[in-house]
Image (cartoon, grey):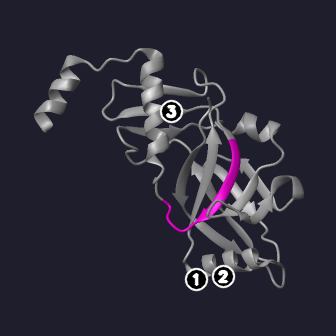
Amino acid sequence: MTTNETRFYAGLEIRQAGTARPRLTGYAATFDKQSHDLGGFVEIIRRGAFSRSLRENPDVRAFVEHDVRNIIGRRSAGTLDIGEDAHGLRIEISPPDTQAGRDVVENVRSGNLDGMSFAFKIPDKNKGQAWHFDKNPAVRELLDLDVFKVSVVAIPAFPDTDVALRSLAEARERCGYRPSVDLLTRKLLLR
């Protein structure tokens, strides 16, 4: 079973030229940077992790706070431009002239909303990620992801650690990981 996972990043801005409708721009993910501790492990998204998915999936959607009632962009409609560059998963959203669209623009403009999030699946647990349990905390490299939505969010953090913890447990079980005696001893000494 493939589990949906969500990650959050700060950094969103409004761009507007003249009388044109405002556009929201930013990054839903950044490459080669270590995340916060997600509950016993950290993640690093590697360059190219979204390439295959973006080629194969023409219909990524953009929401406010992941609420499907507040859709503000869609790749297939031309209102969401999403792609990889050297920095990460770049987005540009042209919000519609709807209540949700006007509200998100005003909330970003006022600073109430300043983060981005993306939801993903790892299609092949053996090729889409690499675990390094010899590090403390463990490191999960994300190599090939299916991205299916991005969202403008108020709290750019990592609150979905329950999903992340399941991923860590599944990976340890799949590869037969057993902590070394030294690691267990260090954990006991820290307590």
Rendered residue at 81%/57% (across/down): 74
Circle 2 — which element? helix
Which secondary structure, mark 3? Answer: strand
Q: Where residue 25 appears, x then y in whole percent?
A: 68, 65
Residue 141 marker: 3
Nearer-N-terminus badge (3/2): 2
| Secondary element at image label 1 | helix
Q: Vertical placement of 93 versus 142: above or below?
A: below
Instruction: Measure how far apart labels 1 and 2 are at the Cα level.
Output: 6 Å
Residue type of the residue flagged with mark 3: Glu
Check disc 2 and report the residue beneath it: 106
Classified by dominant secondary structure, the portion drawn in magenta counts as strand
Q: Position of residue 96 (x, y in %)?
A: 82, 72
Query: Dot 3: few (<14), some (14–19), or many (≥20) neighbours within 10 Å?
Result: some
Q: What crowding class fits label 2: few (fewer than 14 Cα within 10 Å), some (14-19), or many (20 or more)?
A: some
The amino acid pointed to by label 2 is Glu
Tell me the distance, in whole angstroms, between the alpha carbons under discs 3 and 1: 35 Å
Residue carrying label 1: 110
Percent from the top left, x then y, of residue 77? 88, 58
> In the displayed structure, does residue 178 sit left or right of residue 80?
left
| 111 is higher (above) or lower (below) than 88 | below
- Nearer mark to the viewer, of 3 and 2: 2
Bounds of the magenta segment: 147-156
Total labels drawn: 3
Instruction: Check whether the beta carbons of the residues at disc 1 and disc 2 lie within 8 A of each other.
Output: yes
Q: Quadrant for residue 151, please give it.
A: bottom right
Image location (x, y in percent) of residue 108: 62, 76
Quarter of the image for residue 79 reads bottom right
